[in-house]
Structure formats: C-alpha cells, structure tokens
Image (spheres, rainbow, N blue to C red):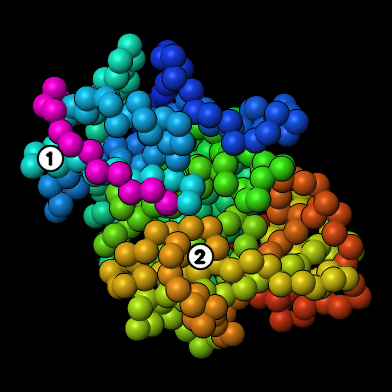
Amino acid sequence: MAETVSVTELTPADLSETPLLRDHMAPPEARDARYEANYDRTTLWYDAFWREDRGEVTVIAPLLLNLARPLSQARILLDGRLVRLRRRRFQRHEIWRLPAPARPERLRVEGQGWAVEASVGRARPERFAGRNVLLTISRNNDLQWVRDYALFHRKTQGAEAILFIDNGSDAYAPDDIARVIGETGLAAHVISAPVPYGPVIRGISNPHRGKFFRSAMMNLARLRYLYGARAVLNSDIDELIWSEGRSVFDMAAAHPIGFAPFRGRWRVPGPDAEPPLRHADHFVLPEQNVACPIKYAVAPGRLAGRFNWDVHRLERLPFKHRFLRQDAGYWHCAAVSTGWKSGGRLTMPGSDDIDAPLKALLEDVLGGGKARS
C-alpha cells in the first residue's frame, strides 16, 4: 500500500501593515543587501496550533526583541475571547502558550494602533506516531538530491517517514517535493514556509543569532507533528548517516534519555564525476578531512525529547559531548549544495584516498547517482 504524502503552509502573523518592526541585530556597517534580504523584521509569529492533549494553543515565534513590550501591552484573543499568554524564550526563538479547552479558529493580537491575526491549526501527530522519522529543512535543493536523501535513509537506516520543511523554494512547488518523496516509499508531510531564514551577522559575538527560522521550525516539528514518533533524525539533504550494528533511530530509542549525537566527515566527488553531481559521486576523502558539526537522533517520548531542539544540540542539555557516539556518523557531501552559504565547498580539493566501502554502498543503494526505489 502506498504511503500518503501531504502538503500544508505555515500561517504566520505579519507586521508589515502595522507601525511595528523588529529591531536590527546587526550594526549599520554590517547591513548589506544579503542581510536585508534575510533578516526577519516583520514576522510576529510563525504558526499557531491547538494541542487537544494539553488544552492549549502553542505558538512558535522568532525572538521578539523590542516587540516584547508592545506584545506585553496588547490584548490576546482566541476567537474573540481574551486569554493570557505565557512566553518562554530560547536562544533564537520563542514558544508561547495560551489556554484553550476547545480548538479556536483565530488568534488575534490587538495593540495600541495596531493588530494582527492568523488562523490556528491543529496538532497532527498521527502520521508519525511510532515511526522513525527524518526531519529536514531545505530550499531549492535539486529534487534528485531530495529523492536520493530520502531513499538512502529508508534503505540503510530504516526511516519510515519524513517531515520536510521547505523554506520558500522558487525552483519548484511544494507539490513537486511531495511527488518525489512519494516515489521513495516514505510517508511524508511537506510544510511550505516562505519566510526569511535569517542572515549571518558580522560584528556581533554570535553571528548566527539572527537565524530565527531554523530552530523555530525544529520545535514546531517537535511540538506539532513529532511528539509521538519513535525516533527522529535531524539532518540535512547533503548528509548521509551511517551507523554500526543498528540504526541511529534504534540507538536513540534504546538510550536511557533518548539521545544519539554523532559527528560527520566530508566527502568530495570522484575525479571523473560529471555534473549534475549526486550523493553517489561522493566517495573521495578531501585533502583536509576535518570533522563536521554534531547532528543527532532523538526519541521524543524520552527525557531528551523534552529539551528544545536546535541544529547541532539540544538547547540547555548539559554535558552534551558525553553522549557523543563513535559507532555512528555522517558523510557530508560537498557538492550536494546550491552554494547558498558560500561556494568554497563546491570546489573542495580531494585527496588520492578513495573510501571504497562507501563507494560500493552508494552504488548499491543509489545506483551510481541514479536512485532506484
């Protein structure tokens, strides 16, 4: 029986038609065109959804910064009913909770001379309940890369479903992503999220602090869709996870707190590879084989699943490096990239060393760059 694939859109609240704007985080000299295009000054919240099990509406938002004061003075209404908002702030996003014994249709915020509102969705954990789930965020990645990524992890790690968050791709439509994933045999849900990703900010101590979107989306996934999953693998389209003896999903599910973090290593295309390059071309070690940042699998129903999910860690989890695994990791495929961060990785020099076991695995699973289902 074919698995189902569905598509929905975020329902953000936007301040563009109000006098309010989020303060800049970058000093004036760092506000170049790329910063202006990517820094989010107008999203008040990304999405709001009702959790029947908690009797409340959960709201996922970027950091408020200067917007905290007008929000604190505003009226918060669910279908016209005044409610009290509870905020919890994290490093790059916020989570708000509002009491709601029954599901409301609309969330409205009314301030002095301004108002915004958006629809309230519903938590949808059923598709992912009890399953091993891939969680990935993407923009304009080649659809063949998407297919290869999904198929590889179904075949080698036992992935059963994928929650795919598309950050406003303009090279194709969300339905195209759903179609390609559907060909791999995974159950899937695609979230269309065309809001600013956030810039790297020069001139501040944490240059990534303005990237509100990614950590917010990971926790939207955690709290709206994935809280009933058996285990969740947080990784990117250019990352292929390996493990010894058992899958990383099994490692997370069996761990006392439900956490399985691991590091990666770069791989570059072979010397005879020709564009368009695929994961299956990446079996050569680079000249400088440095370690890549931590990624992880997590079991949402265990202790680790209660922590806030971030790109390379569980936020506020102490002693995270004590959990680092040596029997799992990932191959970071250098040329599986649109070059959106920088183009340097696309020309990463290779060494004379070939990872022969990886080459054979990629040929077996992906057919030398042409994915087979």
- Measured as percent of width and height from the top left, residue 175 is found at 46, 36
Is the residue 66 above or below the residue 306 in the image? above
Q: Can the viewer see residue 326? A: yes
| Magenta region | 79-90
Q: In the image, residue 346 lies at what x, y percent? A: 81, 52
Quarter of image, res 106? top left
Q: Could you say which quadrant of the image residue 103 lies in?
A: top left
Q: Do the residues labelled 2 and 1 touch (CB within 8 Å)?
A: no
Q: Is residue 120 magenta?
A: no
Please tell me the numbered disc located at residue 313. 2
- Tag on residue 365? none
Residue 329 spot, x, y in % from top left: 60, 75
Amino acid bearing label 1: Ala
- Label 1 residue SS: loop
Mark number, residue 100: 1
- Going 64% across and 57% down the picture, which residue do you hit? 238
Query: Which of 67/167 is in front?
Result: 67
